[in-house]
Image (tube, rainbow, N blue to C red):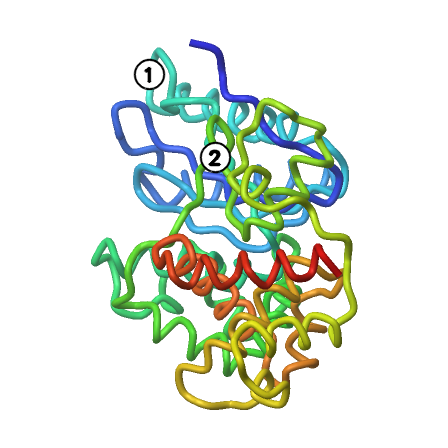
């Protein structure tokens, strides 16, 4: 079987995961974890990789990284091969240490980054290794909650999206008993993000073989002005335009507006949040949940398609 093709481009953000072969431990002692973090620091420095977060478990690890240059594979090869060789010499082992090269999930920064970071930091809690993610020594959670930049991790990028340390702490607490992180897998690619993000990646890579559902459902709409979008939504949903920015319970008109602003305009989530008068993380979460709901609710999906049809027809 051919290896899955990795999606790489400058500025991409990834959730990296790898496990021990046969799910064996890859960290047996404190010295092993320290060695891995030292190599992670050195490897990221050599290749200019930005480490947004990490968590080392007993038999696997999680990394949240950004690649300003298109060098993901070279970075991971240096990190994993160097550590594996060191580990096998230390414990007199033969054969592979890791079960595979590594799994990489391409991440949309604005809509998913905060949730993914919290998910990574909550791994020790889910594994019942601790009740307090901040107290777990082998993750970047403590660095986040103290908002301290270290040689390895700078939490400011994710914390800015979260709205600060206080909001990030709230998100962690809310997610402790939440369901596992949703992952959107398209064919042989792993992408975590909105449908619009996946379409954008496909256009960047010019991969015609990817069957993105949005390409068959919706002819691409050129970036449109928010006022035109408001008019179309208000007409189709039979609501007043002011409803689209009202903070009311179960305001589907507002959620529709958020989702279509992200999908069919050039605005970032931070700018969309400002347009509708809410914080950035909440806007990103509503967009993600609304997209998921449109995939499950045929009536809602039909309404969205009707709005998009109206936009196409001008």
Q: Position of residue 219 (x, y in %)?
A: 65, 44
Instruction: Please give left or right for residue 34 compared with residue 129 in the image.
Output: right
Quadrant hosting residue 135? bottom left
Pick the front one: 106 or 152: 106
Name the residue: 33% across, 41% down.
29
Residue 58 occupies which quadrant of the picture? top left
Which residue occupies 33% across, 16% down?
Answer: 93
What residue is pinned by disc 1? 93
Vertical arrangement, residue 18 with respect to residue 148, above or below: above
Q: Is residue 179 above or below residue 283?
A: above
> Vertical placement of 150 versus 44: above or below?
below
Quarter of the picture containing the C terminus is bottom right
Name the residue nearer the viewer: 112 or 310.
310
Q: Position of residue 308 (x, y in %)?
A: 62, 58
- Name the one closer to the observer, 110 or 74: 110
Q: Quadrant of the N terminus?
A: top left
Q: Callout 1: 10 Å neighbours few (<14), some, many (20+)? A: few
Residue drawn where x is 73% and y is 33% of the image: 70
Label 1 element class: loop
**Which numbered dot is residue 240?**
none
First along the sequence among labels 2 and 1 = 1
Label 2 environment density (alpha carbons within 10 Å; few <14, some 14–19, many ≥20)? some
Frontmost residue, 30 versus 84: 84
Pointer 2 residue: 186
Q: Which residue is outermost to the left?
A: 128
Q: Residue 240: x, y in percent?
A: 59, 88
Spatial separation of the CA atoms under disc 2 and disc 1: 37 Å
Q: Residue at x 49, y 70 (%)?
A: 286
Tell me the element at label 2: strand
Q: Position of residue 54 (x, y in %)?
A: 49, 51
């Amino acid at each position: 079987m051919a290896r899955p093709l990795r999606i790489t481009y400058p500025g991409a953000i990834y959730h990296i995961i790898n496990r021990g072969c046969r799910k064996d431990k890859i960290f047996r002692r404190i010295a092993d974890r320290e060695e891995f973090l030292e190599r992670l620091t050195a490897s990221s420095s050599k290749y200019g990789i930005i480490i947004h977060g990490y968590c080392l478990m007993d038999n696997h690890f999680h990394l949240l990284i950004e690649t300003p240059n298109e060098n993901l594979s070279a970075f991971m090869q240096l990190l994993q091969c160097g550590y594996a060789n060191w580990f096998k010499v230390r414990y007199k082992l033969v054969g592979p240490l890791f079960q595979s090269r590594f799994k990489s999930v391409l991440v949309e920064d604005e809509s998913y980054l905060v949730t993914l970071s919290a998910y990574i930091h909550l791994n020790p809690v889910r594994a019942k290794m601790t009740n307090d993610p901040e107290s777990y020594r082998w993750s970047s959670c403590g660095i986040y909650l103290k908002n301290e930049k270290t040689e390895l991790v700078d939490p400011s990028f994710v914390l800015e999206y979260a709205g600060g340390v206080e909001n990030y702490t709230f998100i962690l607490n809310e997610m402790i008993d939440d369901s596992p992180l949703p992952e959107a897998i398209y064919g042989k690619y792993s992408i975590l993000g909105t449908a619009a993000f996946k379409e954008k990646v496909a256009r960047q890579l010019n991969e015609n073989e990817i069957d993105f559902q949005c390409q068959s459902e919706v002819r691409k709409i050129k970036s449109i002005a928010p006022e035109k979008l408001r008019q179309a939504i208000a007409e189709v949903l039979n609501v007043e335009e002011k409803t689209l920015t009202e903070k009311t319970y179960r305001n589907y008109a507002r959620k529709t507006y958020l989702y279509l602003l992200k999908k069919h305009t050039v605005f970032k989530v931070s700018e969309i949040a400002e347009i509708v008068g809410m914080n950035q993380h909440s806007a990103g979460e509503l967009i993600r949940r609304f997209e998921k709901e449109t995939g499950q609710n045929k009536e809602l999906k039909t309404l969205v398609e009707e709005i998009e049809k109206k936009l196409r027809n001008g």
